[in-house]
Image: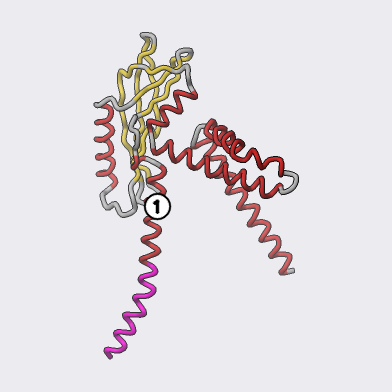
Amino acid sequence: MTGKMKKIADTFSIVLGFIVMGAGILFLVFIENPVRYFFYVVFLAVVINFKSFPNLRIDFKKVAGNFLITLCVAYLSLITLLSLSPFLKIQEFKLSHPGWKPVSAQIIKPTALWDTGYKREGNSYVDVYYEYLSDGKLYKNSASEALYQYYPLWNRKKSHELVNEFSKSVSEKIKKKDYIIFSDPDQPEKSKLFLSTDLFYFQGSLFYNMVTGMAALLLIILGLTAAIFLVPLNRQREGKRK
């Protein structure tokens, strides 16, 4: 009976793991990022693994496994690179939306906000209301979470101070016109705002978020390890003194 229950529990854990992994993939592919990114990496993975496809019947698990690994690595690399470089993100948008044209902004009103993070203090982001001209007609739109700024766990400033600093930097970008708005000439009410044209925007990237998160985890592990070894050592010293 115990063996049967263990088997059921193991099966449930595996199924639950696949469900969680699948939900994460669906979130990344269909909600967090444009679906076209996924098609890019599928094409790339097919090209890279093309020579191994004839071996599918011989060793299906190995070929399929290599394809999935290539797919995951390529996808994570792509979204990390595009989050790191607003310039490249703009170029990708131009290529995938060849008919869309830059338009002139009339009003841009940013609202800097705070998002409480997990495993860290949080991050700043900005929502933007904007108006633009297309063929002499004024249109209105908004962009939620148009730009992020992440902070490491060891940042000791208050959230309102960080939001104020971020708000000032965003206002400076707008003042310098470090942004671009695209609109579809066939449907001018549709538009896309890029609030930064920088080649690299490190602190607003997934890469920065990941690196600082890993660094914080490493510091915690080192701190715990040091505590485990130092506490007994101090006790031994105190015992010798007595």
For residue 26, above or below residue 191: below
Q: Quadrant of residue 23?
A: top right
Quadrant into which the C terminus falls = bottom left
Residue 167 position within the rendered picture, expressed as x and y whole percent measured from the top left: 27, 36
Q: Which residue in the structure is indicated by mark 1?
A: 213
For residue 215, above or below residue 92: below
The residue drawn where x is 71% and y is 44% is: 55
In this picture, residue 49 sits left or right of residue 219: right
Identify the image's colour scheme: rainbow, by chain, secondary structure or one colour. Answer: secondary structure
In this picture, residue 163 sits left or right of residue 18: left
Question: Among all residues in the image, which is located at the extreme front?
Answer: 51
Please, what is the dominant secondary structure of the magenta stretch? helix
Quadrant into which the N terminus falls = bottom right
Residue 142 position within the rendered picture, expressed as x and y whole percent measured from the top left: 39, 26
Q: Quadrant of residue 50?
A: top right
Query: Residue 237 in magenta?
Result: yes
For residue 190, above or below residue 241: above
Q: Mark 1 Cα within 10 Å, few/some/many (few <14, many 20+)? A: some
Per the rendered image, the range of residues in magenta is 224-242
Which residue occupies the foreground of this view, 63 or 188?
63
Residue 189 position within the rendered picture, expressed as x and y whole percent measured from the top left: 44, 17
The residue drawn where x is 45% and y is 17% is: 184
Residue 170 position within the rendered picture, expressed as x and y whole percent measured from the top left: 28, 33
